[in-house]
Amino acid sequence: MAFQKYILGLLLVAVVTSCGISKSLEDTPDVSAYNQTKPERIATSDSTYYTKQAYLAANKYGQWELFAEGDPYQIGLQSGALTQELFEEQERAFLGKVGEIVPSKFKQYLLRKILAWYNRKMYLHVPEEYKAEILGLSKYAGDDYDYVADDYLRMLYLHSAHDIGHALQDLALVGCSSFAAWGEKTEDGSLIIGRNFDFYAGDAFAKNKIIAFIKPTNGYKFMSVTWPGMIGVVSGMNEKGLTITINAGKSDVPWSAKTPISILTREILQYASTIDEAIEIAKRRQVFVSESILVGSAIDNKAITIEVSPENFGVYQVENTNQLICSNHFQSDAYANDENNIKHIAESHSQYRYERMEELLNETQKLTPLAAVDILRNTKGLEDKSIGFGNEKALNQLLAHHAIVFKPQEQVVWVSANPYQLGAFVAYDLNTVFQEAPKNKSGISLHNETLTIEVDPFLYTDTYQNYERNRVLSREISKAISNNEHVKPKTLKEFQKTNPDYWEVYYIIGKYNYEKKYYRAALNAFERAKTKEITTVPDREEIDLYIKKIKRRLNE
């Protein structure tokens, strides 16, 4: 309901005013100082392409590896030329449902108005070099979604998708977990960082993840895990061993876009070599949502979190310990009395995952990259309780876009291959990559097979297959509820059998029976759900409300 009210409010404001919109629609970065040459793309196979200054190739694990160098506009052009088909596929995955939800031309016109108004100030908060890179990328955008916005503006707007997604609770796109350890907490004393990026926008969205290696004209060389059309950074490390990962915090619903978090973190990764330099860059930008930015530094051999929000700024550094844990709530003194943060800790699954990371790290005598991967892959709850596969209280919610482990002093990074965190964690030594990449025209993967961590054996079990079947059934039954369709009893039984410890299974069965007026069956399902590990306080309250209404109908 909150989401619908928010959209209605935006629509009313956007339709009645055009104040400030025209400037944003007309703003185009000046790229006259950059190389204007459009690259010639050469294909050596259906999964290997190169230009004079860049290449794109798929490794044997199904990950795309992108290398690009040059000025901002050229990096955009090179990346756009190489990933054109992938970006069109990514837009279909992300924006395709928009066309289904908003099929009428008039409503598409209104949507365009809303986006233009909402993003009217973004161009003032994105550095010119990144707008130039986005402009280069946009030269290779498709035409299917021009009704959303013109190519350049659409690609600019898409960089705020992460911010908008986590600010609107109804969309439930994110619930990330990350941790760092160093000194006596690791095997050799050097810094190790692990993180799950649980940004979910559909299975198709995570299909074409890109491991990008960028050599800009200005700033440091860096790698990041991204997707086609995205120049921002959600997980990355630069040549100085500075790492960046982001975890969403609790935000008020934003009414105007400013600096997307991924653009801020791109700037930090490209221009900071130490924690102090990262903090200084973060202070300069205005953001429009709340975010914890976990920064690790090889030079400092430690990690901290920079906690940003539209109205506040904090830095959290651990004392008397060599490990840092970050989920989706703030920990610095600056947010000690923040009402949003206090409520989020009390009602969400963030504190639970924090305690689970703490529990697993305490059980690990000395953290290693392999041990970090094991923690990221863990599907259990506190005290190893079975809480159902896909539960957001688990570190591994079996929906992550990617997981990543950094060893900054050695310039080594491990990136998970699909699906989720279960595929191999493919290793890259940045020293080798940036030495070999500029002359690599054959598409040979530059990953380090010796250091790569094997596939999780869980992927080959019947339990995993049951989980995937359960996800399919969940969508089918939820759709049947929305359309008031009949579901066979054997389907409901299979749904329960394929993930018996997950509270949401019984919640969905309860909703189906309630809508069909099978009140006794609905009551049994909801009461069964309450015996499981329910994700959030609002979820539990909703189940209690259903139970109360059913008992009233049954005169109990």
Image: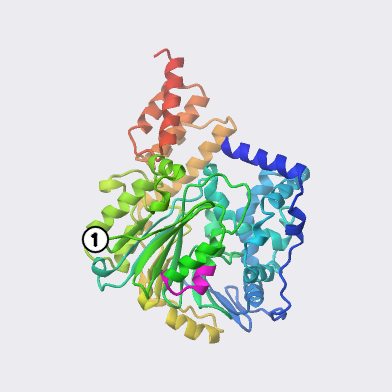
Establish if 111 lies above or below 217.
Answer: above
* Dominant secondary structure of the residues highlighted in magenta in the image: helix
Asked if residue 209 shows in the view, the reply is no
Reply above or below: 38 against 504.
below
Name the foreground residue: 361 vs 209.
361
> Looking at the image, which residue is at 38% across and 63% down?
304
User: Is residue 189 at all visible to an observer of this figure?
Assistant: yes
Q: Does 52 sit left or right of 103 as displayed?
A: left
Residue that carries the numbered disc 1 in the rendered image: 364
Element on which disc 1 rests: loop
Q: Is residue 473 magenta?
A: no
Q: Quadrant of residue 158?
A: bottom right
In the rendered image, residue 454, in percent from the top left (x then y), is placed at: 35, 67
Q: Is residue 460 left or right of residue 513?
A: left
Q: Position of residue 57 (x, y in %)?
A: 55, 75
Query: Measured from the top left, where is residue 391 in percent x and y?
Result: 39, 45
The quadrant in which the N terminus is found is top right
Horizontally, is 40 left or right of 506 in the view?
right
Q: Nearer the viewer, residue 408 or 147?
A: 408
The picture quadrant where one finds residue 316 is bottom left
Image spot of residue 503 (x, y percent): 39, 37
Q: Residue at x 59, y 56 (%)?
A: 160
Amino acid on which the number 1 mark rests in the picture: Thr
Q: In the image shown, does 361 or 489 lie closer to the viewer? A: 361
Q: Residues within 10 Å of mark 1 (few under 14, many from 20)?
A: some
Residue 274 part of the magenta-drawn span = yes
Q: How many marks?
A: 1
Region rendered in magenta: 267-275
Q: Compared to 145, does 411 lie above or below?
A: below
Q: Which corner quadrant holds the C terminus?
A: top left
